[in-house]
Amino acid sequence: SESDPNLISSESYLVLLVVKRVRQRKQDGTLYLMAERIAWGPEGKDRFTVSHLYADIRCQKISPDGKAKIQLQLVLHTGESTTFHFANESTALKDRDATKELLQQLLPKFKKKANKELEEKNRMLQEDPVLFQLYKDLVVSQVISAEEFWANRLSLSSVEHSISNNNKQEVGISAAFLADIRPQTDGCNGLRYNLTTDIIESIFRTYPTVKQKYSENVPHNMTEKEFWTRFFQSHYFHRDRISTGLQDIFSECAKQDEKGLKSMVTQGVKNPMVDLLSLEDKTLDEGYGTATVPTTSNSSNKSLRENSNSAIIKRFNHHSAMVLAAGLLCVIFRDAPSDQASETSSTDGNSRDSDFFQPPLKKVKLQEAIEYDDLQGDSGRKTISLNLKKSDRYSHGPTPLQSQHYTTSQDIITSISIIQHEMRSYKPRLTQVMSSSAASSAIIALSPGGVLMQGGAQQTINQLVPTDVQSELKHLYMAAGELLRHFWSCFPVSTPFLEEKVVKMKSNLEKFQVTKLRPFQEKIQRQYLSTNLTGHLEEMLQAAYNKFQAWQTRRMMRKT
Amino acid sequence: MFADDEINILVIVLDVNPIWWGQQAQREPQFTLSTCLDSLMVLANAHLVMSRTNKLAVIANLYQKSHFLYPSKQWKSGDEISTSSDGKYELLSVTNDLFAEEIRNLMDRTEVSGSHTDSLLAVSIAKALCCILNLWFMQIAGQDVKSRILVIKAAEDSTLQYMNFMNVIFAAQKKNILIDACVLDADSGLLQQACDITGGLYLKIPQKIALAQYLLWVFLPDAEQRSQLLLPPPVHVDYRAACFCHRNLIEIGYVCSVCLSIFCNFSPICTTCETAFKMPLPQMAKTKKKKVKTAN
């Protein structure tokens, strides 16, 4: 039902934008942007001839400014493209831009979903060769459809994904985001700045004042483009922040930044172990390091160069502090307030107040430094010692306690004397150790088939059957196992969906038997392998068929 | 040649329980201790001849003591070696002579005693392990030492040696020393386990008079060569534990969670560590059954 654009479900009825006088393929018509799709219908007709799901659209393109024809092109994942020509003389440009912006907002939402699923599937197939083999055996040879194959598997991983999405990590801010803008010369004494949404987001997160200005001015007073042009032109952005009067909307931002910086300095660093004030340029002697400069903050003594240097350094510090603060702000909002990491949050002059932990912090830090948890003594748990009454029981092995042959003392004496007598005159006679008949009977017993070689036959099955046959058998077992699992999971059949599925799985099993099992059996027969390798597989399939039969007859009886 | 880089150590442990052998002499006069010794000598000679670097040791297990028959302490190098009349390789003739003399002396010294007449093979096997280790330390760097112990078992297993025997087996396994067993009379569960754990061969021979043939066929090749030969398949080893109360071999039993002693029947108090256990309540079983029924 998704492929037919004219079947509109209740969701699709939600039309977000309608644009009249849009031509497609030299035909006049109307363009509709809905919740999940974009569609176009010719003038006067009720039906849509063009309809694309946002998920299918890879990207959109617009014709450059200045061209006579105002067009918008949609490029699909499959490679095809559809071009819409906005033909209303007065509002064409506005229409096109409105469409473009709406699409800009909608497309990313759908894009992620489709790609993610495909990516996930590909990843799973690549990571698990067993799964890949199963996929090849079952789906590629069309025993079951791809949907059924992925039905159980994707549900597991999508659950994991939804959990992880809730705890998605915030993307941090690169400290160099301003430098990354990289202006390019326009050719005629102008500069071209490329702004992406990421950079804009970084600017807003780091400099909340700029965000504030943006929300105040755009789109009432000026367009986005104008705002950013002004931003880059203003000296706020540039190195030397010499304020050029109150016309610049960003001069206020500069003032606020100064204030923020001052408050940061007064707050200082909360970590009692760090003493920032001791970090100064010190010289050892003449020629080693800089000459001592009086560190008075009397600005009139400083040279111009020193002033601008300190201004830059101030700006760097402020920028870094803002970047760090913006990153930490989300951490504070998420985690519980009793977070010792919040000591660093006060570096941002504009953040909320969070110095709860003044006095105990030092103590805790000192304790952390001198104590190790695992070196602590035992918490003194009371233990009960093992009390064994009859420990000699352990030393008795599995040999039963029955007494051995009872030998009388007379027997003992007799035996020993016999042996001693024998050994006294013992001389090795190595040429007459055994008779040839004894030797040959021993050899017979040790030859294959002999008395002593009986147990060996069982081991040779895996030596008789060639390895490729063995691996094919393994694949068959895996594929059959998968199908049987789907089949047996339908019982007890309680819903019509399960009924359908059970019938389908039975036919799948039969298909499997015909397309995969029979050829294999024929192959091994041709190789004269007498061992019955597929007997068990057939038993399993037969058990499934019997169950299906029984279920079907019961269903028939219930219906009659 | 590669053969020079490899040392093959064979230690033969012979059970010379005189009571058993004396009775055996009365039962079957064709196969007596002398014949057995002769067969062993054949094997020993063959092993020494296989390679120049092969090493041999023979230990006799008399009741609970072990004696080295070869190499013997009696032999001091430099002594006059009686050259044998049949032109045999001198090493072999010396070996055989020493072997024979030692066993004669040993049996001479045997005293009649009614107690402690069990053969404790664990003693000799432990001695064998030490001997192998000794030879090991003498190897030159780069030499591969392969060792195995061949146990010729005559009399029955003794219950006294279980723990020691198992320790010895695991020690051998750790050091990759094979334990082979050639059993003349009654099957021995301990030796079966030893062979299974260390990777050796266990064989109970049907005809004692053909002992030499079995020894040469099955026990002369070393572990590497055995993989190329068709030899008797490994026996099925009974690894069942024996319950502590009756010493019956059981497959399913009760184990005390405190002292790990095994019982065949449930008893509320463990007799080894005196821990009290609660009786399983019969009512629980009933509710379980009810639940199962409703699910179906």
Image: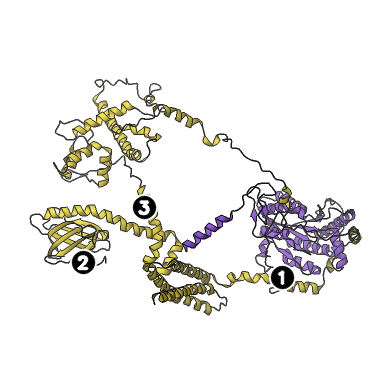
Chain colored yellow: A
Under circle 2, the secondary element is loop
Closest to the observer, B274 or A396: B274
Closest to the observer, A285 or B43: B43
**Residue B105 makes an appearance in the image:** yes
Q: Which residue is mark 2?
A: A6
- Most distant residue in the left direction: A90
Residue A244: mark in rendering: none
A114 left or right, relative to A67: right
Under circle 1, the secondary element is helix
**Residue B132 makes an appearance in the image:** no
| Residue shown at the point (52%, 77%) measured from the top left | A524
Q: Residues within 10 Å of mark 2 (few under 14, many from 20)?
A: some
Q: Quadrant of residue A30?
A: bottom left
Quadrant holding the N terminus of chain B: bottom right
| Residue shown at the point (22%, 43%) measured from the top left | A183
Q: Which residue is mark 1?
A: A452
Residue type (three-letter) at the residue carrying disc 3: Ser
Tags 3 and 2 both on a single chain? yes
Residue type (three-letter) at the residue carrying disc 2: Asn
Residue type (three-letter) at the residue carrying disc 1: Leu
Chain letter for the residue marked with disc 1 in the picture? A
Under circle 3, the secondary element is helix
Chain colored purple: B
Residue A162: mark in rendering: 3
At which x and y percent is residue A453? 69, 71
At which x and y percent is residue B257? 62, 49
Q: CA distance from mark 1 to mark 3?
A: 63 Å
Chain letter for the residue marked with disc 3 in the picture? A
Chain letter for the residue marked with disc 2 in the picture? A
A168 versus A377 height, above or below: below
